[in-house]
Image (spheres, rainbow, N blue to C red):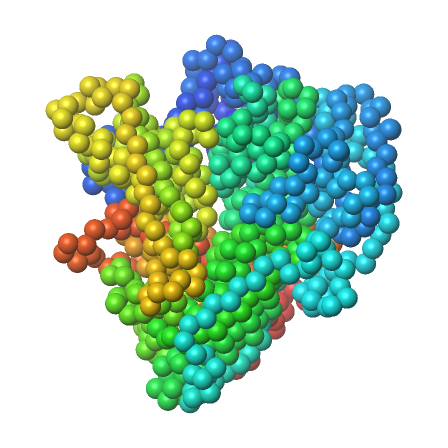
Amino acid sequence: MRKKVLGTGKYPDDIEIEDVWQNLNRAYGLEEDVPYRRRSRELSLPEESGKAGSLVREALARRDSSIYDGSAENRSDVYGFDASSMAYASCVRAAYPRAVVRRIDLSEAGQVPGVIGILTAADVPHNKVGHIQQDWDVMIAEGDTTRMVGDAICLVVAENRDALEEAKKLVHVDYEVLEPVRNIDEARRPDAPKIHEAGNLCQSRHVTRGDARRALQASKYTVTETFETPFTEHAFLEPECAVAFPYKDGVKILSTDQGAYDTRREVAIMFGWDPKRVVVENQLIGGGFGGKEDVSAQHIAALAAWTYKRAVKVHFSRQESINFHPKRHAMKATFTLGCDEHGKFTGLDCEIFFDTGAYASLCGPVLERACTHAVGPYTYQNTDIRGYGYYTNNPPAGAFRGFGVTQSEFALECVIDLLAKKAGISPWEIRFRNAIEPGLVLPNGQIADGSTALKETLLAVRDVFEKNPGHAGIACAMKNAGVGVGLPDKGRARLQVEKGDVVIYSAASDIGQGCLTVFCQDVAEITGLPMSRIRNAVSNTENAPDSGTTSGSRQTLLTGEAVRGAGRKLREALDAADGKLSRLEGQAFSYVYFEPTDKLGAAKPNPKSHIAYAYATNVAVLDDEGRVTDIYAAYDAGRVINPLSIEGQIEGGVLMSMGYGVTEDFPLKDCVPKARFGTLGLLRATQIPEIHAIMVHHEPKEGEIETAFGAKGIGEITAIPAAPAIAGAYYELDGKLRTKLPLEDTYYRKKQK
């Protein structure tokens, strides 16, 4: 089905030895003997293909790069290497989450016909990788201890898949099995086994402002509750896959990840190389949601390609993907929130514990975001938030859409409902009284800018909430755009005039959010050129600037502003050339966008933690059986650049949040995942409620300049407020507070029993 709808040759998994030419021909309806080369492509609605200017706010079809026309002379032009000589590689994974690897016997496996070689930790120049902390073993060496069942023991490389699978079965590993560290409580024990040499505490954060203790003591009402949320699997449709081959004095990797330059850096660390020796080119990406920020298949494909001097493909099975890649962190947290007699919040104290599994991944930043956003999108100044991330022998945890805020804001919004009941006001009213608005101060000290429209999102859903008493729940959320907190987060882009077209060079990963389409709209808007003259390049770390990771809802804002800045330069050149693009052939226009922020804990009265925040309010409505019938989802994500894209983001994010709330789980037994793709609890089509997408936006005041045409990013915030809104609806329905996800004793859980 994917090949029928999306075509062949656009994803790394479509790169095959057999029938690659015929598959490409059939996919695009061309003659069997017509060869291809890759070029940029544009998917345009017929009515907009020649449209010029004023394309911000237009609903345009998605644009990608990477497709084929009919003008190459040989197959190597398609991928950059001869696909007919490609080998296959796959890892033998650890059988136990915690065990000493006593011996690895490769003798039988190495004799299988078609096996090219088998690599172990001894063959890795530097056996550690990691997105931020380099604590993740490429492979577990003899004498070392496994940390999870996803750990690689060795890498088998073969001429074909049959030989590969046969050889893997013949690798014999002798283990000394040890007791695993199963959860946060076990990891915190003084006598707990150390998963890493430095101990089991991976990261900690302390976010404080004012005097929370005194404020809570003086509060008219307080509520204290403890919450638990599970690990969650991203469940992207495309498992991890990469193809690597020797290139110049290093390797080139065809990958599907969320940051080409991040992958380049990690692979270079493994080799001990100058990063320029590694070229990473992102193909189309079959979903990410944060689960493709860490290297997975890329570095081991590169290792095999460099060792054996040939192209190598690594493709994870679905179960290998589930066992290996980082999940959403499981959380245990206790929240105490206070308010005065009018329902105005006075202070918050909370303690958050994350299970980060076997490796750090992005534990630090995710924990930090959970802590900084635990306060919610409200205005009060006394907070004390302590966060801790612990290693266990579970699969690792890292980035996941919402980036820690899904966990902490679930807890906060549930506590707010309890506080509203104590104060004798409605859940809607208590949120409206405390809602942040332009010019007021967030709990982190940042002054809300003029685009802030949380109150407008609350007003947009007020009627539906009040018309469904006893059946409706409500929750608000905020989510930063950009990395912020003092880190040098930059957007970069280059526009180049090639053969009469404007070609956008940006290493930004489009994982389905539609940023490549937005970039084209940005260029059209600023230059007045028709969309038919604008396209995205097949970008990589060799030909395109570093546009940063696709994370933190940052691409539309940061790289979008870089594209707009480059577009202004092009517009000026066009004006000087009498509007004739042909006169600018070969010229390039580059721009770097950077807006400084303040580090966490900066000694300022009003530090600027992030360049922008998006805001949201969701209302969930239940029927008498407890089935979610409607979710009203109001968002302030700035100006809408592409309504078609943003509606898709809202619908997908709301469903992800609903699944997190009522059906999804990640069961483990002694740190071993027991779920398969079909048993993760993903929502079925018949369970999808009516989703009412609502967008609000503050128009700028006279003299205000809107970055990236006023867009703030929508990707992450859509996945945050639906789960607590549904929890609130059940609380209204039966008066039972549910503090654990997925919510217990609901229509959905009863059906499963």
* 584 displayed left or right of 74: left
In the image, what residue occupies the spot 38% across and 86% down?
Answer: 340
Camera-side residue of 135 and 587: 135
Tell me if residue 583 comes above or below residue 175 in the rendering.
above
Tell me if residue 531 comes above or below residue 683 in the rendering.
above
Q: Residue furthest front?
A: 603
> How many numbered dots are placed on residues in this image?
0
Tell me where residue 394 appears, x and y as whole percent: 69, 55
In the image, what residue occupies the spot 51% across and 67% down?
Answer: 206
| Quadrant of the image containing the C terminus | bottom right
* 298 displayed left or right of 72: right
- Which of the 4 image quarters holds residue 338? bottom left
In the image, what residue occupies the spot 35% across and 65% down?
Answer: 604
Is residue 628 something one can see in this rendering? no
Camera-side residue of 11 and 99: 99
Tell me if residue 468 comes above or below residue 544 in the rendering.
below
Is residue 386 something one can see in this rendering? yes
- Which of the 4 image quarters holds residue 65? top left
| Quadrant of the image containing the N terminus | top right
In the image, what residue occupies the spot 40% across and 33% down?
Answer: 545
Tell me where residue 333 appears, x and y as whole percent: 57, 71
- Which of the 4 image quarters holds residue 15? top right
Tell me where residue 474 appears, x and y as whole percent: 42, 71
Tell me where residue 217 appears, x and y as whole percent: 46, 87
Camera-side residue of 30 and 489: 489
Camera-side residue of 358 and 634: 358
